[in-house]
Each structure stands twice: as C-alpha cells, then as structure tokens.
Amino acid sequence: MITITIACPEALIADANQLARCIGYGPDDDQTYGAASWQDAGGNRYAVASGPVGAAFPQAAASLLASPQWGADMAAAARAQAAIRIWTEDQPITASPDHIAVVIGDDARAALAGLGVTQVPEEAEA
Amino acid sequence: MLGVGYGIASPALWAARWSPGLVYGPSGQGALFRANRFDTLFQDAAGTIPVNAPGQPVGLIRDLSGRGNHASQAVALSRPILARHPASGLRQLLSNSTDLTAWGGSAGVALHQTLASGELVYEISDNDSAVNHSRSLSVNLTSGQSYCFSARVRAGSAEKTQISCQTPGSSAGVVVTWSGGAPSSVVTNGPQTGAVSCDPDPVNAGYYILRGVLNAAVSGLHTMYLWPSAYEASGLTTGTSYFSSPQIETGTVRTGYQAATSTYDVSEAGYGSVWGLRTNGINQWLEIAAFASGSAGRTIVAAIRKRSDVARGTVIEHRPNFSRPGGIGLFAPAADGAASYGVNVYPASSGSAISSGYPALTDCIVTAVAQNGSCIMRINGAQVASATLAGGDWVTFNAGMTIGARDGSSLFGDLMIYGLLYIDRPLAAAEYARAEQYMARLAGVTLA
C-alpha cells in the first residue's frame, strides 16, 4: 500500500466526493472530504484527506472512469478527475483553488506542509 | 484442589487473572479496545478482511468488553492505520531509514552490503563536478527543540562525506563534513553552528557514526541530506561514500538505532514491539454506535502517544460532543497549541473542564474518573488535576462515541492509541490503578 494526501479546494469538494465514490471501495467513500478546515497562505480553504490506498491508485485515478455498482455522479467525478495534479520531485505543486493536489508519501504532515496548507484554528469552546 | 493461600479470594491469584473486562460486571456499559489483539482488527468496516501487518487500515476494531460496542469506519481514507514501534519507545523521526533508494534526490544510489546486524549499507555517488547531488528525506521538526541527526558512514572515493539537516529553501541548518579517517576530521561548516561528532563504529570496522545537532529555529518541514561529496561551492568534488542507518531524534545524543521501513513500522534490535492505531490528526477516526451510559459516572483509561501539540485533538468523546447531559470527552492536547491533556464532562446541567500540562511525543496512560460532584485526571499513575462538578448528578445518556475526532468532523487527534477503556461508572481507586497497569504494559510505559 501507499499513502496519499490530498488537498481539495472547497469548491471541488462535492465533485471530489463523487470521484471517491467512483474509485473507492464503497458508497460511503463519498464522505471522504469533509469540512474545508485547512487554508493556504492566501486564505483559500481546502478539505484534506490522507490514508492508505493500493499501489495502483495513481494509475486508476487517471484511467477512464467506470460507474461503480452503487452508482455515482459520473459528470462530477470526471470534473474532479480532470482537476487532479500529483506532486512529483520534478514538478512540485502547492495547493491551489484550481486543482486537487495529491502527494504520495508516508508522512501526511510533511505532505501538507509541502503543499502549503495549514489547519484553520478551531474556535474557542463556549 | 487449591492450597491454602491460593483460594478464590487470594490477591495473588486475582492479580494474575485480572483483566479490564472484569470492571464491566453484569451491568456496566462501555467499550474496551486493544490494538495488539489482531483477532479483533479488520481492514474493512464489515469485518471481512483481517489486519495482520503494520501499515494496514483498521476499518473495524471489536469491543473486548463484551458489550458489542465495536468501533468502525466506513470511509476508506478515514480509517486509522495499525502501527508498531519498539517497546523501548519511539525515537526515530524519519519515516524511512532502511531504503535509501526511496529517498529523494538525484545522487546515484545502490545497495552495497548488509551488515551482520541486518542493517543495509548503500553506496551513494555523485559524478557531477558542476552540481552537488544528494539523497534526502523530509521530516517535520518543532521550533525550539534540539534534534540529533546521524548516520553510519564509510569513506569511498569521495574526498569528503557530509550529512546535513536543513530547512528547504533557506540557509538554516547544520552541515557535518567528514574528510574520512580520523574522527577529528569532522567539522561543522553549515550556515548554522551545532555540535558535531564522528565516532568509530565499535562493531563494523571502517565505519563511523557521524552526528550533528540542529536547534530548530522554525517549526515545519526540514530535510535530512546524505552527501557523497562536498556541499560548498568552493569544494565541489565527485565520488562515492557509503551510508546506512540514518536517524533523527529529539535531544543531542544518538541513541540505539531504530529501523523505520515506514512511518507505521519501526523496530529496534533487542526490543519487542508495541502496537497501536495511528490516527493522523487530519481525517482518520472511528465511531461507536449509540448505547446507553448509566447515571453513576464515567471513567476513561487511555494508553496513547500524543504525536503533536499543534491542534486540539480528540481521544474519545460522546457524540456530537461532550456538552450534552451525561457526556464526557478526553482530549490530547486540550487546546490548540497547548502541551496538555484535558477532560471535559457534562454531568447533567453544565460542563466542567480540567487539563494538565504534558508535552507531545511521549507515551502516556491518561485516566479520567468522574463521579457525582467531582472529577480527577491522572497521567501515568499519578493524579494531576481535579475539579468540583457543579452540574448536578450524572444522568443517563444514550449516544454514540467517536475515537480520534469530534463527531467525525473536527478536532482530529494526531495519536497512537495502544488501548482504550470507557465505562459508565467511576472506577474505584484499586480498579483504575489495575487498569492503568494493564494499559501501561500495552504501551511500554512505566507508571509513577
């Protein structure tokens, strides 16, 4: 398995969740991206997810999408797929509102630091 | 037949057979989890794919209390990961110290030999006289903390061998330069000064241990570099050097080498492993379906490693949060940026919070015991905080619980969870002391 860390722009969360539903393991994977509680230096918000996937994930994520047996919004999934950018040493990327940034690597915290996003501080409890 | 002194009431026999499952009795409600009970772990939420190796996701962990309050996660990427580290404690901060071909950088790298200890030695080469090349790996470090970075080296054809730890894109960092041979030939010549050393490897002839100490000036991503040739522009050389067993750890001393094949799998020669569920403080958590907690009080005993103090993190909490009549939550840390643990309780009509300072990157047994009128928190077997509860007597509460996040949507905990016990009554002192001893064994922690 490999670990991927993803920063999804707030405006693409719904589409990205359909992509996760499409290439994930079950219908519940459409809850992969939650609140946009991370931000870049410009204040743009992102939902972040990180976890283990099969080694074939990068290739699968870039392949022609097939509708899963539990159904998915394929148009939304395709929009999200088109917005994916994968960080490489030769072509490093940072998080941006116009793409879904993916880093492959064990250290999720290091990945997020490299993408230039930080957690939005929680509001103080009443 | 049992002999005199070993009857049913014998403390010695009871001690030998004591299990935290006993505290639930016939009517107690709660849950009990142990990460080292692989027979209770499954990769999927349905419980069809067993977990049997570090690095695998945990979609279901079965409750050992006998109450059936299993914890699960339906979303694949949100599942915690099974991890292990040496019982001596986790010191290695590199996520991969065993396979230098997987490090970044453009220097040539090839496996050279395997030492008798099993440690792998790599030949790293730089044949470019115009630009220096290295192998490198990133690691998150914290401002104000000293870090020892080190590696075993052997001279090859390169005139100089270097290791360094630096902040990418800036000049901050310490460079250790070794000219081969005598330990006295090691110097620090980086933009930042720091202690350096070179000691002969007492086991492997011809090898030396290079060490540098970085006092991190900023928090965030740093990089450890292995250079087969000189770093400075004035000293460009080419050639090869041999490296193995890199390590970064807090403090100024290189301790026993811990081999990290991944961030989830760290081992050390001569020590057994302790196992835990890693939640990443980003999106990983587990949920327990709603069950009825009674009105006697609450106890949580958690064996955890708090991996960060950056943001408030949930260990376990009632849904949607503790702030409902009958609710409780345990947090690590208790507030953003606080080096602490904290407990929040809401017996009936108002909430109370207690917390106590304790820094990250330590394994701890944290206990919260709440009864009518009072609540205490203990860390590693000693009481560290208490509060008088003014919110009335405890009431029954029918709610689910989450582990590793608040309601699955915020306060994600950056944790290693070795074991976790929750019960809907205040354990007596003798009971929680035994539960703490039990949890301490799971985490390799020595109690006060």
Image (tube, grey):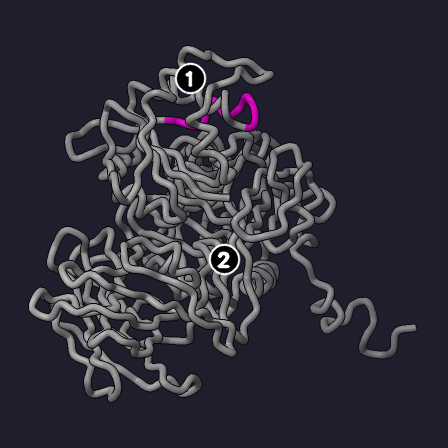
Circle 1 Cα neighbour tier, 10 Å, few/some/many (<14 / 14–19 / ≥20): many
Q: Position of residue A9 (x, y in %)?
A: 29, 25
Work out whether residue B107 or residue B148 is closer to the camera in this orientation and state it.
Answer: B107
Q: Residue at 34% across / 34% down in the picture?
A: A102
Q: Amino acid at mark 1?
A: Ala
Up-down relation of residue B278 to residue A61 (above or below): below
For the question of whether residue B132 can be seen, the reply is: yes
Chain under disc 1: A
- Residue A6 picture location, percent across and down: 36, 34
Can you tell which mark lies on residue A77?
1
Mark-to-mark CA distance, 2 and 1: 34 Å
Residue carrying label 2: B265
Does dot 2 land on a helix, a strand or a loop?
strand
In the rendered structure, the residue with mark 2 lies on which chain? B
Residue B111 numbered mark, or none: none
Per the rendered image, the range of residues in magenta is A25-34
Task: Please indicate whether residue B395 sits to the left or right of residue B148 in the image.
Answer: right
> Is A28 within the magenta?
yes
Q: Residue pushed farthest left?
A: B234
**Does B190 lie within the magenta span?**
no
- Looking at the rendered image, the disc whose residue lies closer to the viewer, 2 or 1, is 1
Q: For the residue labelled by badge 1, is the local secondary structure a helix, a strand or a loop?
A: helix
Q: Nearer the viewer, residue B189 or A51?
A: B189
> Which corner quadrant holds the C terminus of chain A?
top left
Percent x, y for residue B20? 65, 56
| Quadrant position of residue B146 | bottom left
Q: In percent of the image, x 52 and y 17: which residue is there?
A: A66
What residue type is disc 2 on?
A: Asp
Which residue corresponds to the image point at 55% horizontal and 46% vertical from the top-left? B56
> Do the residues under discs 2 and 1 have CB atoms within 8 angstroms?
no
